[in-house]
Image: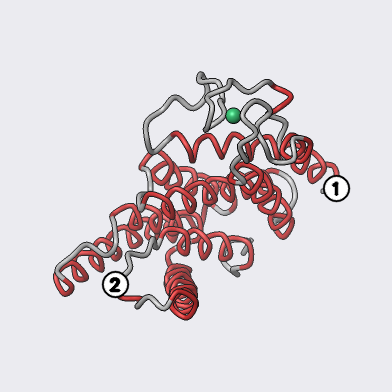
Amino acid sequence: MTHELTIALAAAPFIGSFLGLVIDRLPSGRPIIFDRSTCDYCGKTLHWRELIPLLSFILLRGRCRRCNHPLRVFYPLIELAAVVVVISACVAPSGWLFWCSILLGWCLLVLAVIDHRHLVLPDTLTLPLIPIGLLVAYVINPGMIHHHVFGAAIGLFVFVGIARLYALLRDREGLGFGDAKLLAGAGAWLGWDALPGVVLLAACSALAIALLGQAVERQPVATREIAFGPYLAFAFWASWLLGPLAFDH
Ligand SMILES: [Zn+2]
């Protein structure tokens, strides 16, 4: 495990940089890889020395070398978050499941931040989680695969049902179908019987943060549009790492 952890920890800041690019560029359809990074303020193409994760930000004291404008803290934060994903994945069993867990965590991190920013969960990230989750579940325990297929189906249908009901009652869209696809992914990875716990944990944490936000900003909860994806992603991640189902083999 220590060997795997060292590799994962060394790679995490670089992967984090890439995840930052995905978060920045995927929603607007910009090419993710074949587009050099530039300063957001003066447009200067960044040298490789200015793109070393975490280190460059510290060495440049958080400012562009040409225009001296403060650089966005977004990238160092995502790079740190990618490291936190690796550290939290230590709870997962070692071997291939450790790497699967990290990939899942990074994917959920990207989804959470994109939804927080744009109120959208891109299909390109949510949909692959369903077959990959089913595959992982099958390799862990082929005898339990029906629980996971059922989970994916329930996740999708229940959430679409809730979204329809909500739209009917409140006369506006409260929950997107992206949430349904993410919950279907959770069903595929965790099995159907983990889903009530995932939804409950997501709803409770969303409510807690909303009430906290209300206390700080004095803005009523009901009038604000809340991205549910980050909470769903958090509940999915927590249930995968700590839930009794995922490692029940
Ligand atoms: Zn600049």
Residue 74 locus on image (x, y percent): 58, 45
Of circles 1 and 2, which is in front?
Answer: 2
- Residue sitting farthest toward the right: 2
Vertical comparison of 99 with 40: above or below: below
In this picture the colour scheme is secondary structure
Camera-side residue: 226 or 148?
226
Which of the numbered marks, if any, corresponds to residue 46? none
Q: Amino acid at mark 2?
A: Thr
Which of the numbered marks, if any, corresponds to residue 2? 1
Give the residue pinned by disc 2: 223
In the image, taking residue 221 as reference, residue 249 lies left or right, namely right
**What crowding class fits label 1: few (fewer than 14 Cα within 10 Å), some (14-19), or many (20 or more)?**
few
**SS for dot 2:** helix
Residue 31 locus on image (x, y percent): 44, 24
Residue drawn at 52 percent across, 32 percent down = 40
- The answer to whether the beta carbon of the residue marked 2 is less than 8 Å from any atom of ligand 1 is no
Quadrant containing the C terminus is: bottom right
In the image, taking residue 123 as reference, residue 42 lies left or right, namely right
The image shows a total of numbered marks equal to 2
Q: Amino acid at mark 1?
A: Thr
Quarter of the rendered image showing ligand 1: top right
| Disc on the earlier residue, 1 or 2 | 1
Residue 71 locus on image (x, y percent): 62, 39
Q: Is residue 232 visible?
A: yes
Residue drawn at 85 percent across, 42 percent down = 3
**SS for dot 1:** helix
